[in-house]
Image (cartoon, helix red, strand yellow):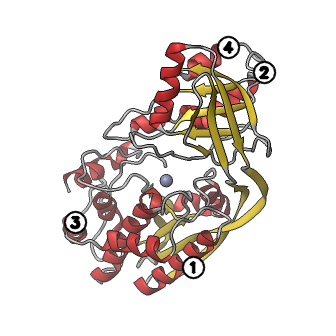
Amino acid sequence: MKILKVKITALLGFALMTAASPCMAADNLISKADLRIAAQLGKKAYGSDLAYKIDESLTTEVGPRRVGTYGDSAGIAWAVAKMKAFGFNKVWTERVVTPGWYRGKIEARVTAPYPQRIEAIALGNSVGTGKEGVTAPLVHFRTMAELKAVPDGSLKGKIAFISLRMERAHDASGYGKGGAPRRKGGIIAGKKGALALIIRSVGTSNNRITHTGGQSGNIPAAAISNPDADLLVNMFKRTKEIKFFLKSTAGRTKDVITANVIGEITGSSDPKNYVVMGAHLDSWDMGTGAIDDGMGVGIVLAAAKNIIDSGKRPKRSIRVLLFGAEEIGLYGAAAYVKKHEAEMARHVIGAEWDLGTGKIYSLQPGVGQTALKAIAQMAKL
Ligand SMILES: [Zn+2]
């Protein structure tokens, strides 16, 4: 999941600049006619449950879509069929090569002094412990800074545990901060010599469920549920000598092939300039992939369908870009940039939805000075 705040109505305002109405005057304002169209589209979108219905279709007919699985290829076929049914002018796929990984089975428990089962999940791209598993002393770090501070090699023969908690925030900033142990913990703990890494799940649920996600270290790495992380913290209040057993049969495989799926509404008078609305089609395998990121898929496809159904052709081409292999490390996005390098300067605006939708409360564009007036018009919408 990445963080994005540009919301759909604003983007429609930008995309739907028709050939008939001069889109941007010298002062870079959006014409009144185009603002009207954008407002109509926004009203239609907010009054419709189409995005939800698309997501429901994806999760019911396909389900989870982790790269390299049956669901991944079924999801690609689903997206192609959906785009064709919606009336896009062009629909195609582009090959994406991505590292392969399998989850295997995991077992985790405290063996002493308070033997208890621990609810755990392997982190994406992590290696396994071998069939026997490892039993080793657990070393507690409350923050990444504490882990970084210990000398290299000092965790030899030990398992590192980072208890950093993700804080809930309206703009999801807590996910970025709370996710550091998952993204970097394995690399740093490995450098310190650790046998394995255990982190608190990057999520705010108090239920005994775990949250997976990608990581880049080369030691076995797992997340445990919030209540289980609390349990370990409470044990550490009583003793520093905690022994932990971890067995993970996760592992890496040779590269696998997946795809980006692209649907284009070809522009009327400026078709070689592009407005891109993206979301990732792949998901992790433990849920149905409804929220991360079936919801984004629903949002961008519904927006495009509303534009197609309006009967008005945008001036520029709109590309709905459903990325493959996002979760394992943004491989679909990188493949798109590489393949379209020569036309990247003609990508007028790009946005990606991976945080759901709701009432717009913030618009934070990364545009230049000359476009700011137009952004203010969008914000009004
Ligand atoms: Zn996501």
Distance from mark 3 CB to nearest ligand 1 atom below 8 Å: no
Tags 4 and 2 touching, CB below 8 Å: no
N-terminal of the two: label 4 or label 1? 1
Label 1 Cα neighbours within 10 Å, binned few <14 / some 14-19 / many ≥20: some
Q: Which residue is mark 1?
A: 77
Q: Residue at x 30, y 84 (%)?
A: 311
Residue 164 visible within the image: no
Looking at marks 2 and 3 on the same chain, the residue that comes earlier in the sequence is marked by 3
Rendered-image quadrant of the C terminus: bottom left
Amino acid of disc 3: Tyr
Amino acid identity at mark 2: Lys
Q: Which residue is mark 2?
A: 156
Q: CA distance from mark 3 to mark 1?
A: 28 Å
- Three-letter amino acid code of the residue under disc 1: Ala
Q: Nearer the viewer, mark 2 or mark 3?
A: 2
Amino acid type, callout 4: Val
Residue count near mark 3 (Cα–Cα under 10 Å), binned few <14, some 14–19, many ≥20: few
Circle 2 SS class: loop
Left-right relation of 288 to 19: right
**Can residue 6 be seen from the camera position used here?**
yes
Query: Circle 4 is placed at which residue position?
Result: 150
Q: Position of residue 135 (x, y in %)?
A: 73, 30
Distance from disc 4 to disc 2, alpha carbons, whole Å, reads 12 Å
Whether 179 is drawn above or below 70: the answer is above
> Is tag 3's residue or tag 1's residue first in the polypeptide sequence?
3
Q: Earlier in the sequence, mark 4 or mark 2?
A: 4
Q: Which residue is denoted by mark 3 in the rendering?
A: 46
> Which label's residue is closer to the chain start, 3 or 4?
3
Tell whether circle 2 marks a residue whose Cβ is less than 8 angstroms from ligand 1: no
Q: Quadrant of residue 301?
A: bottom left
Tell which tag, 4 or 2, sits nearer the viewer. Answer: 2
